Amino acid sequence: MIDHLDHLVLTTAHESACIHLYTQVLGMQLESFVGGTPPVERRAFKFGQQKINLHLKGQEFEPKAHTPVPGALDLCFIAALPLDRVIARLEAAQVAMVEGPVLRTGATGRIRSVYVRDPDLNLIEISELAP
């Protein structure tokens, strides 16, 4: 019945720092669009054929999760570049790694991952497919 994930929603209390990490460090594209009733300008981070809609804490769009809070997500992204280059980019941006590189099990097999936290303390796993 389900084919793939289209988008998810990230609630932030640190909008500018969040936008910086997801666009400047992780390389996602910031998109603005109009949605909802009444129509309101919204923001999202696009990458590949997916996106992460951005909600500001206390200004979430309806309908929303029952209890939207910053720092509740644990996300895993497959990188478009080798993990060693990801690590170099994180270090250059002074983004502290929580753990890694380590081997894990992903949706389609073994992955090699590093973990960081975004400005709201969400856990972000960045991975490459393991040989």
Image (cartoon, rainbow, N blue to C red):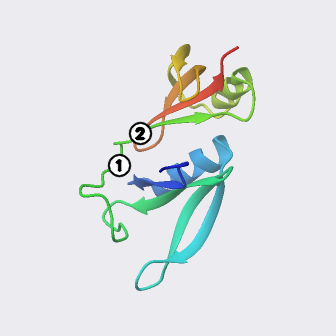
Q: Amino acid at mark 2?
A: Asn
Q: Position of residue 59 (x, y in %)?
A: 35, 68
**Separation (CA) of disc 1 from disc 2:** 7 Å
Residue, disc 2: 122
**Residue 2 shows in this picture:** yes
Residue at image position (35%, 66%) is 60
Which of 60 and 112 lies nearest the eye of the viewer? 112
Instruction: Determine the residue located farthest toward the front in the rendered image.
Output: 1
Query: Image quadrant for the C terminus?
Result: top right
Q: Secondary structure at mark 2?
A: loop
Label 1 Cα neighbours within 10 Å, binned few <14 / some 14-19 / many ≥20: some
Picture quadrant of residue 100: top right
**Residue 100 shows in this picture:** no
Residue at image position (51%, 71%) is 42
Q: Position of residue 10 (x, y in %)?
A: 43, 53
Q: Amino acid at mark 1?
A: Pro
Precedes in sequence: disc 1 or disc 2? 1
Task: Please report contact status of discs 1 and 2: CB closer than 8 Å, yes or no.
Answer: yes
Residue at image position (48%, 40%) is 118
Residue 2 lies, with reference to residue 66, above or below; the image says above
Residue, disc 1: 70
Q: Position of residue 47 (x, y in %)?
A: 66, 50
